[in-house]
Amino acid sequence: MKSSKLIAVGIALFALVWILSGVIFSGGEKRPDKKAASAQLAQKIMEVRVRDLSAQPFANDVIVTGRSRASRKVEVKAETDGQVKELLKQEGDAAEDQEIIAKIELRDRAAKVKEAKKRVSQRQIEYNAAKKLENKGFNSKVRLAQTLADLETARAELKNADVDLAKTEIKAPLEGLILDQSIEVGDFVSVGDPLFTVVDLDPIELVAFVSERNISEMKHGQSARAEFLNGRVLEGKITYIAPAADPQTRTFPVEISGANADLQLKEGLTAKVFIPVEAKPAHKISPSVLSLNDGGQVGVKIVGEGDIVEFKPVTILADTPKHMWVGGLPEKVTLITVGQDFVIHGQRVKPVKAEGDGLL
């Protein structure tokens, strides 16, 4: 019994010594510190792929929607009363400048002109006779002045009669097309009544609406091209730039004028207008390299002096499915093309040049 107890005590002492020996001999070794390991990992310089880019001249078209309109439109109104006796032109007809397009009844206008002419002749004779008598001393200056006044009155009446007679012939105020016809033969018109609307379609004008982002790039005399839905193309130049924006659309009306000799382009057609702007330095990049900073600005990350990451805001000038053009970068940059999502502004990196000359 004694021997078994001694054996048990011996085994317990051996186990205790074995456990203590492990603690004692491993006391100089320290377990890995998680914080130290993280700090060591953070200090490791990360590799990023980069490409050297240089600015290139970039000119992009400002593309807006426009609508055609006549370069001139005049509403012809009656300048005298009377019945319409004849229509020489109708809607859709072409008219030359000052061509007669309608006539109003003469009534007694021709007779009034004839009478006024005779009265002028009579007053002229009276004035000539008074002048001869005054020269011979047989007439007073008062009488001479009276006959001269009568002559001038007669001339004025003749002129009024001539004008009233001429107003019976309705003439086209410009070379163009009859757009609207408001009268028919037999209608009675009064002074101020609308008769016709005449439009000039050569040259034709386009009114395009340019955003405030692009209005500063518009210049008088600048070339423009318009493509209509029917396939027609119009080459023209900017003739007017509005000094103020439309309060409803916040866009600026810009007028473009172009030749339309065959008159095939009508008023009210919709067109896509292309206005080329002056070339400016820009960089061609892949959309995948874009990033956002903490302020929500769109930009790219580049490697600057000392291999330090820098965030550079950019302005998108043109966007296509394969690439985009951006402005706002220095002329030459080292752009991060791979790994930009894993580095931050101010971080030191190890740049690795990308191979090949393709797009990023």
Image (tube, grey):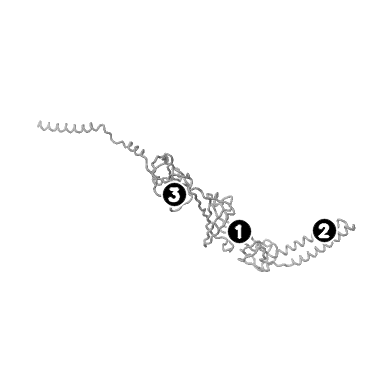
Distance from disc 1 to disc 3, alpha carbons, whole Å, reads 43 Å
Is 4 drawn above or below residue 72 in the view shown?
A: above
Q: Looking at the image, is mark 1 or mark 3 earlier in the sequence? A: 1
The answer to which image quadrant residue 156 occupies is: bottom right
- The image position of residue 272, as x and y in percent, is 52, 57
SS category of the residue bearing label 2: helix
Residue 193 placed where, x, y %?
A: 66, 62
* Depicted 112 relative to depicted 305: above or below: below
Q: Amino acid at mark 2?
A: Leu
Mark 3 Cα-neighbour bin, 10 Å: few <14, some 14–19, many ≥20? many
- Say which residue label 1 marks: 71
Where the N terminus falls, by quadrant? top left
Q: Earlier in the sequence, mark 1 or mark 2?
A: 1
Residue 132 drawn above or below residue 329: below
Q: Are marks 2 and 3 in contact (CB under 8 Å)?
A: no
The amino acid type, in three-letter code, at marker 1 is Ser
Give x and y (percent) for residue 240.
59, 53
The quadrant where residue 158 appears: bottom right
Q: Is residue 203 left or right of residue 353?
A: right
Q: Which mark is residue 285?
A: 3
The disc at residue 107 is: none
* Picture residue at 44% right of the left edge, 51% below the top: 323
Left or right position of 121 against 102: right
State the mark number for residue 148.
2
Instruction: Identify the residue at the far front of this view.
Output: 356
Crowding at mark 2 (Cα within 10 Å: few <14, some 14-19, many 20+): some
